[in-house]
């Protein structure tokens, strides 16, 4: 399968997985909340919140493993791949053990001292916490296996496991509705077992399908490779910590100066932006292995081209959903929330703008990972992103509106993107003029056209369900203008050929 077709296929598979799992999860949460009640459901979520505090370590290690496995996929070095997988597995086993020890050492103290849990539920809460800690270990150990699937671009396996996991959670939600046992205890224990079962699914698939996952031996343990992978993961961890400090730091600033009501608006805005950003993040997940493999094969110029394409497509995918949402945010909030916190609509729109600025250079960040330039990126880009904290403190201390904090949030993201381009030009040889021609100048026209059309709609139409008109017209305008103004001739030709093949297959099936 051609690389472009593989990216499209994998992205489609991940979108199907996302749609199925979201629908099942929404219904499962409804059943669980009704079965457990507000108190027990709150206890479970606060326990999972404590356990997931260290999840950014898992994400950083995941990126490290995927990078190394993808990088050497094209080098025809099977022994090297086996060694990378073995060392990655050892790294994750030790990281998992360390996290479990920390959780077990600190978790009981946190549960008893800081969390408000009714005394009659404390014993059950401890049991649920222990199972959650165990599930964290298996989550860590499953990373090398999911990374191997990702590096081999077999996203369908990840999709199948995720969908099976969603159905298992649905069955559990139905079961606790009827059980006479302690529902919180049953739910907590079974949720941990589902995580363990998912690990064994990853293990069996990888052991059967990928040769590098079959041969575990102590002779493959390489201290230098462990140090190299650990260092790469370490700088990714610093990047993750920067993101956490930025988001949570802004929340703390808003709480100190303006109170919890403004925090509610900020939290809702982050939820909206994260959900919309998932569409472009899914596409990036499919194209990242190609970026790593291109650099691993020594095809640096092709890697830079893929990085530029990732920037363009990530932005377009986010803008496709974000633009109509931004113009109809009032209506969306009214349909979604019973009571919309003050400032929510403007916060949502400004944070979406900030995320869109970030997407303009997200492919360049993947290029840094492929070229092992994460250290440079984490230091310089991370420093700029953290500027929001002192700047936000200053404007709030001077008595300016909270809106200025979120405006600065967007400005800082734009400056971080500029820094990425400067660093990519200096250390990766990225042609800045080419980047502007193939990314910036190609995404601006559909944005301007679609924003103009949406503005005319909201100014001239005032029917009750105008949001439907806005969304439909916006989608049509954005897709058509992107097709003719954002894509290259070769990309349009590829889409036409793909559509032709799909039509032939459909005709063959039904005729």
Image (spheres, rainbow, N blue to C red):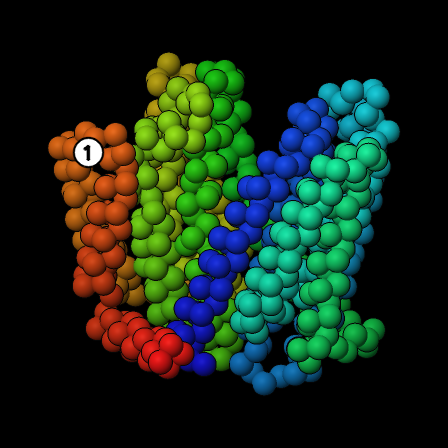
Query: Dot 1, how many residues are within 10 Å of its Cα: few (below 14), some (14-19), or many (20+)?
Result: some
The residue drawn where x is 16% and y is 43% is 453
Position of 13 with respect to 411 (left or right) is right
- 476 over 224 or under it: above or below: above
Residue matched to label 1 = 458
Between residue 247 and residue 381, name the one nearer to us: 247
Q: Provide the secondary structure element on which disc 1 rests.
A: helix
Residue sitting farthest toward the right: 123
Q: Residue 285 location, x and y as percent?
A: 49, 61
Q: Residue at x 55, y 68 (%)?
A: 156
In the image, 416 versus 447, the foreground residue is 447
Q: Position of 236 compared to 223: left or right?
A: left
Q: Quadrant of the N terminus?
A: bottom left
Instruction: Tell me the quadrant of the picture where the C terminus can be found.
Output: bottom left
Kindly identify the residue that appears in the image at 51 percent across and 27 percent down: 251
146 vs 242, left or right, is right
At x 20%, y 40%, the residue is: 454
- Up the image or down, 281 lies above or below 370; here it is above
Q: Quadrant of residue 45?
A: top right
Question: Residue 198: image x %, image y %?
Answer: 71, 58
| Location of residue 455 by image quarter | top left
The extreme bottom residue here reads: 76
Horizontal relation, residue 182 to residue 60: left or right: right
**Can you give x and y, in whole percent of width and height, for residue 354 in the image?**
36, 40
Residue 360 pos. (x, y %): 34, 53
């Amino acid at each position: 399968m051609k690389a472009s077709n593989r990216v499209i296929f994998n992205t489609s598979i991940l979108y199907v997985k996302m749609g199925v799992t979201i629908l099942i999860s929404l219904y499962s949460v409804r059943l669980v909340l009704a079965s457990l009640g507000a108190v027990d459901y709150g206890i479970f979520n606060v326990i999972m919140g404590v356990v997931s505090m260290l999840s950014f370590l898992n994400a950083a290690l995941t990126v490290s493993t995927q990078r190394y496995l993808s990088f050497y996929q094209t080098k025809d070095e099977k022994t090297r791949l086996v060694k990378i997988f073995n060392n990655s597995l050892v790294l994750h086993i030790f990281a998992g053990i360390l996290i479990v020890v920390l959780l077990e050492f600190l978790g009981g103290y946190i549960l008893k001292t800081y969390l408000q849990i009714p005394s009659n539920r404390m014993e059950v809460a401890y049991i649920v916490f222990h199972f959650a800690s165990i599930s964290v270990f298996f989550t860590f150990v499953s990373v090398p296996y999911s990374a191997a699937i990702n590096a081999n671009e077999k996203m369908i396996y990840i999709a199948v496991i995720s969908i099976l996991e969603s159905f298992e959670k649905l069955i559990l939600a139905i079961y606790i509705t009827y059980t006479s046992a302690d529902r919180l205890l049953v739910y907590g224990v079974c949720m941990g077992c589902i995580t363990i079962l998912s690990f064994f699914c990853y293990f069996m698939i990888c052991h059967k399908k990928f040769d590098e996952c079959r041969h575990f031996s102590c002779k493959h343990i390489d201290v230098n490779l462990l140090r190299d992978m650990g260092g790469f993961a370490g700088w990714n961890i610093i990047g993750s910590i920067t993101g956490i400090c930025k988001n949570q730091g802004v929340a703390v600033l808003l709480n100190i100066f303006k109170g919890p009501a403004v925090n509610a608006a900020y939290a809702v805005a982050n939820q909206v932006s994260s959900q919309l950003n998932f569409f472009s993040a899914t596409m990036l997940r499919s194209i990242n292995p190609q970026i790593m493999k291109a650099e691993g094969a020594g095809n640096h110029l092709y890697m830079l081209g893929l990085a530029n394409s990732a920037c363009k497509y990530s932005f377009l995918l986010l803008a496709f959903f974000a633009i109509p949402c931004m113009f109809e945010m009032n209506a969306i909030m009214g349909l979604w929330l019973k009571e919309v916190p003050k400032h929510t609509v403007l916060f949502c729109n400004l944070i979406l703008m900030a995320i869109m600025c970030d997407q303009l250079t997200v492919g360049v960040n993947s290029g840094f990972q492929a070229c092992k330039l994460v250290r440079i990126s984490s230091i310089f880009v991370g420093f700029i992103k953290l500027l929001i904290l002192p700047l936000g403190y200053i404007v709030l201390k001077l008595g300016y509106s909270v809106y200025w904090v979120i405006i600065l949030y967007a400005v800082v993201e734009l400056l971080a993107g500029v820094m990425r381009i400067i660093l990519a030009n200096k250390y990766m040889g990225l042609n800045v003029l080419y980047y502007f021609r193939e990314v910036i100048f190609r995404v601006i026209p559909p944005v301007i056209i679609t924003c103009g059309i949406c503005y005319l709609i909201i100014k001239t139409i005032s029917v009750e369900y105008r949001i439907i008109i806005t969304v439909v017209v916006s989608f049509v305008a954005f897709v058509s203008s992107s097709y003719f103004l954002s894509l290259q001739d070769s990309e349009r030709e590829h889409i036409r050929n793909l559509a032709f093949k799909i039509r032939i297959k459909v005709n063959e099936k039904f005729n």
